[in-house]
Image (cartoon, rainbow, N blue to C red):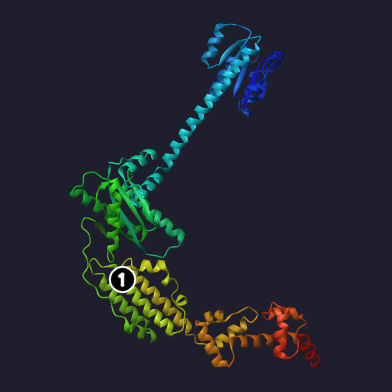
Amino acid sequence: MYQLLIVDDEIHAVRAVQAAVDWAELSISRIHVAHNIKQAMGIFAEHPIDIMICDIEMPQGSGIELLSWVRERHLLTESIFLTCHSNFAYAKEAIQLGSLDYILKPVKMNELRAVVLKGVEKVNEKREQHISKAESQYYAKLWHTNRSILMERFWQDVLNQRDASPKRIRDVLQSRNLPIRETDSFLPILIFVQRWAEKLNTQDRRLMEYAVMNAADHMILRGDEQGQLVRITSDMFVAILPEGTRAEDHAKNIEQMCKTYIESCNRYFRCDISCYVGEQGMIHEMAARYNRLICLKESNLNRNNHVFFVSEGINTAQSVAVIQMNVWLKMLEQGAYDAVYSESERYLNSLKDVVGLNVEVLRQFVQKFLQKLYSFIQYKEWQAYEVLGEAIATEQLSRAVRSVTDLHAWVKYALDQTTQFCYGAEDTKPLMDRIIAFIKEHVDQAISREDIARHVNLHPDYLSRRFKKETGKSIVEFIVEERISMAKELLVTTHMSVSEIALCVGYSNFSYFSKIFKQEVKMNPQQYRKSHRSEL
């Protein structure tokens, strides 16, 4: 739908134009009227005017002046002039300003209708051109803003072999308008954060990861538009460098550049980090180059903050025997935790000098070490998940075999967890006293055998056997006795209702409380209260 503005100082002329045409038929939904330039400008300020029919000669300013003002501010508006004078100078000036037509008064209905219809068509054309231009500008801006994201997603697809063939790569590059060609050559560098010097919370870790990548962008890519950083995991990413002819001195430059980057990360971000330099190749070869870098990284288990070249590789290690741990279980049972740690430290330090250490050696060590810990925990009748906690989480176990340093940290953490749990379980207060104190403290709550077992660091089955042996009663019987004892005291010494007393001693069901009370005392709560108060 369209809006029309009629500008004429003669009221009768305006009414004649309004009545001359069936405007709804021409999709004109609203007609505005102004009798001078000032009123017309005010209407333009408040409404989107599509077509303006304007008289040329008016007392407070001519239609030519108004059209000149409209052309500066409202480019989509089409204009039609009306006048009583067939002066060619007026027509010439109106056409120069872009007026659609020039009609003499009195206006003929068919002529006006035809010109307005022509104006509607012109407005449609302008709208389409304007929308097309705006869309082009929007997408150009959007592409420029998100170029890095588009480039990263492209390279992620390439490295994951989703865009493998040269033809497919060429089609994607053209469709996304990326500033590289399928015949360009690139050098991949895998960057791996081996560990952080301090334990970071989620927010701080993300900030540090961003800082490490940002440093790589400045120090390795150096702002090259054709280069790209591709995130693989939170601690691993690939720098894709546009590459020329690979010369020996260029390899030295790459090595020095990576060393400088590693030193900066050590100093400013307090992390151990290594760079794995691949081989030059075209885009469709990058997936294979990347997989070789991954294999190179996984072969490095004992060297930190180093630059590795895939062309040099890592020598296969000689056979390494996993240490026997039979005596370690006895050490744990005797409380010699420091001795176990010293033995593990001595062995793991020896692995740091093994070139090309096989990851299987680390996996076997973890399996044997966990077996000894589990045997010790079972001997103590504890539960492994309560003792070791995060140490046996899948993520922690995977991280433990990434390197000798990571394994060393995991062993220390697992032993620390075990030691702390042992010291906590060996409380100076007698076991039965702690159990009974816990029951009395929580007698008004729905406590279970498992709750008590967690409190004293015992297995629930062992707790039940031990409690029965020490007291001659089951835990449930003891809890019932404590609750009835407290209920009897409250019945005699307070004015609380029986239902309130039931809640106070851990029974939410009044009927069940009365039943249990009668079983234990041989009378219901009201009878007990009446008889003992009369005695008092």
Tag 1, which secondary structure? helix
- Can residue 69 be seen? yes
Residue 339 quadrant: bottom left
Who is closer to the viewer here, 517 or 425? 517
Horizontal side, residue 36 vs residue 191: left or right: right
In percent of width and height, residue 219 lies at 31, 50
Q: Please state, as top left, top right, bottom left or bottom right, where the N terminus lies in the image.
A: top right
Provide the residue designation for mark 1.
362
Q: Amino acid at mark 1?
A: Leu
Residue at the left extreme of this rendering = 248
- Which residue is pictured at 62% across the width and 17% down the height? 53
In percent of width and height, residue 18 lies at 69, 18
Count of picture labels: 1
Horizontal side, residue 229 vs residue 428: left or right: left
Horizontal side, residue 366 vs residue 103: left or right: left
Residue at the right extreme of this rendering = 534
In percent of width and height, residue 218 lies at 34, 48
Who is closer to the viewer here, 316 or 105? 316
